[in-house]
């Protein structure tokens, strides 16, 4: 069920997760009822049945591991509830299937390029699996060539960092957004857009619209100078709290050196990662103190931005932050 509803999208843009349950539309109420039925009628019975019939040291799937932890909780530790087990189950299924499908696509792509590897892996499957119709758990450790090929595909193109993408063969429009020939568009978590400096005008206008909406309603916007190599600049309350997320973006840059900046609406916060120091200066006009950005506009680089924002002044959220002296190189 897609929530392509203007009212719902506006609420999400302004309030994020807090918008759920706040003057719900008919579509939201319908979605809530479907989620309740999924939990009460489908997932919880499976979990309760697994708990009642649990046997230790059996051939475990990930739900068995969760249930083992649930049944062996210590008295002095915070308790895990059955509903939390359900939430963990849904998180793994919804996130894991997407990553797995990306990895399968990438593995098949490289397998299609290497005929010799195809033949060797096929022969290994025949030798290990034989006449059985399905690959069983006991077969997995014996499929050395197949495992090695999958690991190599991971090494070359990690699905979380750089999923298999499509590139526009011809210039075309999606509503009023022009997609130039040769442009690749990535969607990562909620919204992720990155593009070269020469192909940014239309998408930059949408980015600025997001920034304006967030700032008008008190949302935090994080702006980073993020060079390809060396130390990267960050403000307080930044990606530090998200741990390895910075590594993800760093590896994205290393694999895509033509990218000039990344704009992402992630966890209800806007992040702008900038690789080009000149563009960084044009965005942070008053970069000495970070007290404000006078005009989020650069006539040489944003020839369409005036449609959305010109002469817009706002108080920069990071005016109290301390910055390093060498953040501009």
Image: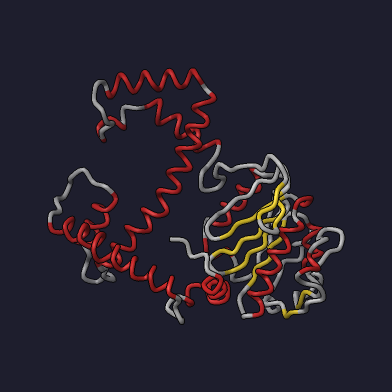
Would you say 192 lies left or right of 52 here?
Answer: right
Q: Quick one: 169 or 299, which is closer to the camera?
A: 169
| Whole-percent x, y for residue 114 in the image | 52, 22
Would you say 242 lies left or right of 76 here?
Answer: right
| Whole-percent x, y for residue 146 in the image | 40, 28
Q: How is the image coloured?
A: secondary structure
| Whole-percent x, y for residue 63 in the image | 27, 53
Quadrant containing the N terminus is bottom left
Q: In terms of image quadrants, where is residue 201?
A: bottom right
* Relative height, residue 22 to residue 264 (above, below): below
* Relative height, residue 15 to residue 242 (above, below): below
| Whole-percent x, y for residue 14 in the image | 57, 76
At x 43% / y 18%, what residue is drawn? 119
Extreme residue toward the right, this view: 300
Quadrant containing the C terminus is bottom right
Q: Quick one: 189 or 316, which is closer to the camera?
A: 189
Would you say 119 lies left or right of 285 here?
Answer: left
Q: Quick one: 69 or 102, which is closer to the camera?
A: 102
At x 65% / y 45%, what residue is drawn? 254
At x 54% / y 60%, what residue is drawn? 190
Q: In terms of image quadrants, where is residue 263?
A: bottom right
């Amino acid at each position: 069920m897609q929530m392509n509803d203007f009212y719902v999208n506006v609420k999400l843009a302004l309030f994020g997760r807090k918008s759920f349950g706040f003057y719900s539309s008919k579509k939201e109420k319908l979605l809530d009822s479907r989620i309740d039925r999924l939990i009460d009628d489908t997932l919880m019975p499976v979990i309760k049945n697994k708990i009642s019939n649990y046997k230790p040291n059996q051939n475990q799937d990930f739900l068995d591991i969760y249930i083992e932890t649930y049944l062996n909780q210590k008295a002095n530790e915070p308790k895990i509830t059955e509903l939390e087990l359900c939430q963990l189950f849904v998180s793994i299924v919804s996130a894991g299937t997407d990553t797995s499908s990306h990895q399968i696509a990438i593995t098949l792509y490289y397998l299609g390029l290497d005929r010799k590897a195809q033949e060797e892996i096929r022969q290994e499957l025949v030798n290990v699996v034989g006449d059985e119709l399905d690959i069983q758990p006991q077969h997995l450790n014996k499929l050395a060539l197949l495992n090695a090929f999958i690991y190599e595909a991971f090494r070359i193109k990690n699905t979380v960092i750089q999923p298999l993408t499509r590139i526009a063969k011809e210039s075309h429009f999606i509503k009023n957004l022009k997609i130039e020939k040769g442009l690749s568009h990535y969607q990562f978590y909620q919204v992720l857009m990155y593009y070269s400096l020469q192909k940014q005008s239309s998408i930059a206008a949408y980015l600025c619209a997001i920034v304006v909406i967030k700032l008008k309603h008190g949302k935090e916007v994080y702006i980073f100078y993020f060079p390809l190599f060396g130390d990267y600049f960050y403000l307080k309350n930044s990606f530090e709290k998200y741990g390895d997320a910075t590594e993800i973006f760093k590896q994205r840059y290393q694999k895509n050196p033509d990218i000039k900046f990344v704009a992402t609406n992630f966890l209800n916060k806007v992040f702008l990662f900038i690789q080009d120091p000149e563009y960084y200066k044009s965005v942070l006009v008053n970069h000495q103190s970070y007290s404000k950005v006078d005009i989020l506009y650069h006539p040489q680089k944003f020839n369409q931005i005036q449609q959305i924002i010109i002469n817009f002044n706002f108080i920069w959220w990071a005016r109290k932050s301390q910055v390093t002296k060498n953040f501009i190189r």
